[in-house]
């Protein structure tokens, strides 16, 4: 048993983040079934009671992990958009962040792929993306930009489903092609 959990100073935000990161890691390694209260608590080095202090139940933990991933994507989009402006800037940031996500070891694929079968997660993703599209309507309402975003989604989905088969173009070439399309729209 890990006794350091009882002796360490209280750092609720660090503990909460450790729990979220542990849940993401377990989902990556084992799928959503790998996210158990016991496994997440052990991975984060806290007691189950410590986990329940932050999350009422497993579903609350999964919801928080999904929100955590959306916050990370939001930070990436904001960072990329700070370096860009004008017509299509949100779509360019979306394309780049989608391609970056495919290259990261802990990209949350198990949780995001679960949106296909989980109506609640699908609704949350839909609301999140719809809110961003409303926010960036001045620069990204062009239907051709929607096609580019859908192509980026398709690239991500294909990478998840076909780990070794990336087609004839490298990811860098495909990303550059999609970015070029945003400037032509």
Image (spheres, rainbow, N blue to C red):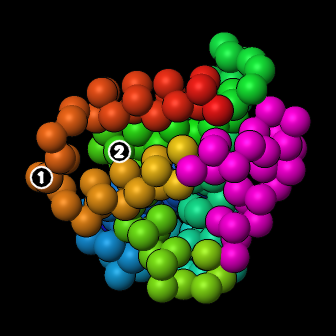
Q: Residues within 10 Å of mark 2 (few under 14, many from 20)?
A: some
Magenta range: 123-147
Q: Quick one: SS at disc 2? A: helix
Q: Residue at x 30, y 27 (%)?
A: 173
| The one of 123 and 57 positioned closer to us in this rendering | 123
Q: Residue at x 17, y 47 (%)?
A: 167
Q: Residues within 10 Å of mark 1 (few under 14, many from 20)?
A: few
Q: Position of residue 133 (x, y in %)?
A: 78, 49
Classify residue 132 as left or right of residue 97.
Answer: right
Q: Is residue 179 visible?
A: yes
Image disc number at residue 102: 2
Q: Position of residue 94 (x, y in %)?
A: 58, 39
Up/down of 112 relative to 147, above or below: below
Q: Quick one: SS at disc 1? A: loop
Q: Is residue 134 magenta?
A: yes
Q: Is residue 114 magenta?
A: no
Classify residue 77 as left or right of residue 29.
Answer: right
Give the residue at mark 1: 164
Q: Is residue 52 visible?
A: no
């Amino acid at each position: 048993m890990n006794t350091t959990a009882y002796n360490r100073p209280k750092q609720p935000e660090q503990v909460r983040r450790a729990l979220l990161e542990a849940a993401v890691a377990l989902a990556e390694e084992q799928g959503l079934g790998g996210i158990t209260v016991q496994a997440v608590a052990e991975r984060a080095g806290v007691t189950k009671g410590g986990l329940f202090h932050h999350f009422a139940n497993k579903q609350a933990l999964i919801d928080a992990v999904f929100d955590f991933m959306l916050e990370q994507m939001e930070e990436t989009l904001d960072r990329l958009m700070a370096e860009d402006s004008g017509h299509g800037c949100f779509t360019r940031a979306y394309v780049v962040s989608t391609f970056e996500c495919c290259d990261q070891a802990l990209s949350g694929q198990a949780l995001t792929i679960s949106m296909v079968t989980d109506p609640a997660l699908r609704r949350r993703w839909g609301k999140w993306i719809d809110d961003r599209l409303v926010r960036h309507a001045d620069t990204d309402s062009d239907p051709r930009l929607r096609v580019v975003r859908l192509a980026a989604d398709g690239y991500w989905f294909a990478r998840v489903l076909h780990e070794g088969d990336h087609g004839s173009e490298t990811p860098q070439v495909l990303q550059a092609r999609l970015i070029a399309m945003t400037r032509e729209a």
